[in-house]
Image (cartoon, grey):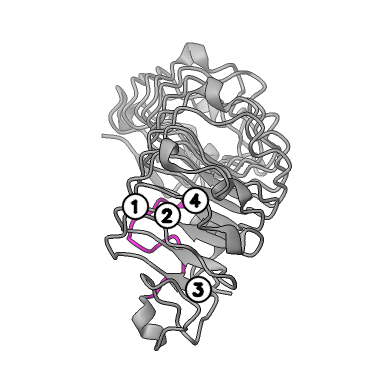
Amino acid sequence: MFPLRVPIFAVLVSLTVGQYDDYDYQPASQYGPSSANCAQECECPINFPTAMYCDSRNLKFVPIVPSGIKYLYLQNNLIEEIKAGVFDNVTAELRWLVLDHNQITNEKVAKGTIDKLTGLHKILFSFNKLTEAVIPPSMSLDELKMMNNQLSKFPAGSLAGMQNLTSVHLQNNELTSKALNGVFKGLNKLVAIDLTNNKLKKLPSGMPSSLETFYGDHNGISSIAAGDLKELPKLAYLRLAYNQMTDAGIPAGVFNVTSLIELDLSYNKLLSIPEINEQLEHLYLQANEINKFNLENICKFSGPLNYSRLKHLRLDGNNITHADLPHDSSNCLRQASDIIFD
């Protein structure tokens, strides 16, 4: 098998920044001569006979995949269509399917193709023209990436029972909160969801208690329900920058949960510092409309054992300066190495 090159958690919380960052890819030529058990348009290195490299070849369709192939690389082509029968030889054995950077639409994904891949572990289907998520019926699926499409629909129940799924990346689409309600329910190994730059108005309902990372930057979220985070006892990283959050949309204590390490509410419409837990380490509130330093929302009271664990606090781009920092804040903020005003 071809292991990921970086620790799995780093993969879960990062955005794609390079052509091959999402999979352990090297050009096929680096592996030597090609095997005879290979589509003629592609290369299957003798040293890695279960991999078929069909990337960057100006292909307009997916070639027929021979039996024995587990890792299929089809990124950076001109593929518009997935024809019936191309995966018939590998319905149970294909593990990785990489289709990034093509021109595939839902209408051109034939029945009996992806919907027959019962052994997939990873499907990477970003930078295409999908309007509805295409989900393989694999209970082994652990990673789903469909970034930078035009997704507005997510079939109800399509992820049901996928107990190995750990990360879902759907950023830069057109998904609404309604379209995603209940989609992630019961996925007890899911630790990371990225919905940056979609059309959410609130957090999707039914997110699993296993969740550790949620990115919802660049949406239209205006409020958080009082019980949203109580249902996510392991949530450590919450990013909601560039939304429409106001004080009225944040119930008292909603962010006062012990699991949070990082909270990003920058570029919203807040007038005050929200109540947080003393365990929080990173708080980003820049570019709001905050006009008062609410020390009581950071520390209820201070003492030898009662103080904030905040290391980084950003307040630049608000209506307060360092002069507004309360004179008794040093005890509460004793671990803060970085408090940024204008």
Mark found first going from the N terminus, 3 or 2:
3
Determine whether label 2 and label 1 are within 8 Å by CB.
yes
Which residue is drawn at the image coordinates 42% and 62% (left, top)? 63
Q: Position of residue 123 (x, y in %)?
A: 52, 53
Q: Is residue 28 left or right of residue 96?
A: left
- Label 3 vs label 1: CA separation? 19 Å
Q: Which amino acid does label 2 sit on?
A: Leu
Determine whether label 4 and label 3 are within 8 Å by CB.
no
Within-10-Å neighbours for mark 3: few <14, some 14–19, many 20+: many
Residue carrying label 3: 51
Where are the magenta residues, as a range? 13-26
Residue carrying label 4: 13
Q: Residue 22 magenta-drawn?
A: yes
Q: In this view, does 116 lie above or below 185?
A: below
- Label 4 vs label 1: CA separation? 29 Å
Mark found first going from the N terminus, 4 or 3:
4
Q: Position of residue 217 (x, y in %)?
A: 41, 33
* Magenta stretch: helix, strand or loop mostly: loop
Residue carrying label 1: 79
Mark found first going from the N terminus, 2 or 1:
1
Q: Which amino acid does label 4 sit on?
A: Val
Q: Which amino acid does label 3 sit on?
A: Ala
Whether residue 262 is visible: no
For marks 4 and 1, give the one nearer the viewer.
1
Residue carrying label 2: 99
Within-10-Å neighbours for mark 1: few <14, some 14–19, many 20+: many
Foreground of the two, 182 or 313: 182
Placement of the N terminus among the 4 image quadrants: bottom right
Determine whether label 2 and label 4 are within 8 Å by CB.
no
Q: What element carries label 2?
A: loop
Q: Is mark 1 on a helix, strand or loop?
A: loop
